[in-house]
Image: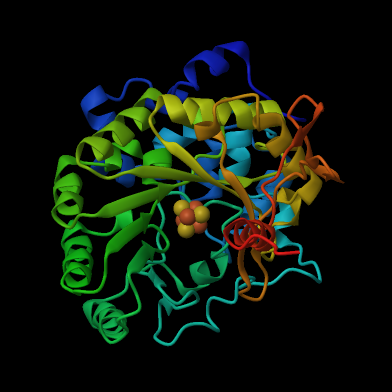
Amino acid sequence: MRHTVSQGEEKTGGASRRLPPWQDVPLDDWNDPKWQRRNIIRDLAGLGKLIFLTNDEKAALASTVSEYHLSITPYYASLMDPQDPADPIRRQAVPLAEEGLVHGHEQSDPLAEENASPVPGLTHRYPDRILLVTTNFCYMYCRHCTRKRIWKQGEGAADKAAIDRMVDYIGSHPEIRDALVSGGDPLTLPLERLEYILSRLRAIDHLEIIRIGSRVPVVMPMGITDDMLAVLEKHQPVWLNTQFNHPREVTPEAAAAVDRLLRAGIPVNNQTVLLKGVNEQPETMLTLNQALLRAKIRPYYLFQCDPVVGTEHFRTPVETGLEIMKALRGHTSGLAIPSYVIDLPGGGGKVPITPNYIVGRTVEGLVLRNFEGKTFVYPEAPPESQTFSRRLRELVPSTA
Ligand code: SF4
């Protein structure tokens, strides 16, 4: 079933609700990250008490969870439709049988992060940027995750010695000006460990910015606590990249968490993953990006889903992404339009994919098609060499 958005969702961006077992939980407990962590759903038995599971889901849970574990916060579970297996929130969190299938073109590490890893946990692909994997743990394991391979290593954080090795590498490479702290989800780390990582990074003179990749604002917004904000605020400039994939994830709680981050001086950008059965409808993506802007989150990237082992059921043709981009451009403000990118397999890096608006060239100029399909001619400036020769002729008049 294709899930689009209702009119109510369009207006509000969705609102969280609680599943029956938690309806009487006092608000203070519900909003307490410790309570949310204590009540995370980890298995078939726990999930079966909350939502109606199909036989396919039960079989998938029994067979895949030993390899690719399960974790869903009560908050995120409460965004699911308990009766609808095709619900877009549920699809991101609950495994299906397809997750156990392996296709020939899929890889466990499609971005070849480990080939570009001079130090365990650190990937140095681009000259001036670095990726640090600081933990294997996430409050919610996204079934489409590009780094599912690290789940097999168990759940744990990089210890101080491992962090020191990564920091020493950055310290000895003055060309690195930007560090992306990711995982797993680094905002699940104990604050003392997060403080250690950020303070060690900030002590490197040539490192200009620190970015954090986290889905905590989406899957457990109450996890953005004042104590965490104090740590982040101390090590500015810190940027946060998050991943809202569907308008129903942009709840009042999530918007409030983002507001707290912004007030602490942390800009928040969003990296949506294009996912079949979740957000491949242009109107869903339009609603999502407009909801993000209302929550003061900048839609930054729309990622084509990577060919990771066991994620074929999430992947769409590239044409789907192009249709989405066509449906956005001209139909909403430019701020609501992310860059659509493919992260090339084998470590080739990100390539932007855009619909072609250039129809051709005439003597009058460049022929362009606009968002309504109408064509216009843009008079181009003459090439630099022609301008130069004209100026030269004006300066040195011909004697002939
Ligand atoms: S939060 Fe990020 S790292 Fe964790 S499972 Fe989801 S996509 Fe993967």
Locate residue 154: give its quadrant: bottom left
Examine the rendered structure and indicate whether residue 156 appears above or below residue 52: below
The residue that appears at 70% across and 62% down in the rendered structure is: 398
The residue that appears at 70% across and 34% down in the rendered structure is: 86
**Image quadrant for the N terminus?**
top right
The residue that appears at 32% across and 70% down in the rendered structure is: 177
- Is residue 245 visible in this depiction of the protein? yes
User: Where residue 264 appears, x then y in whole percent?
Assistant: 19, 41
Locate residue 224: give its quadrant: top left
Q: Is residue 127 left or right of residue 45?
A: left
User: Where residue 27 appears, x then y in whole percent?
Assistant: 26, 23
**Image quadrant for the C terminus?**
bottom right
Q: Nearer the viewer, residue 375 or 162?
A: 375
| Most distant residue in the front direction | 399
Q: Is residue 381 left or right of residue 237?
A: right
User: Where residue 395 appears, x then y in whole percent?
Assistant: 57, 59
How many discs mark residues in the rendered view?
0
Examine the rendered structure and indicate whether residue 387 appears above or below residue 53: below
User: Where residue 98 appears, x then y in whole percent?
Assistant: 75, 54
Locate residue 245: give its quadrant: top right
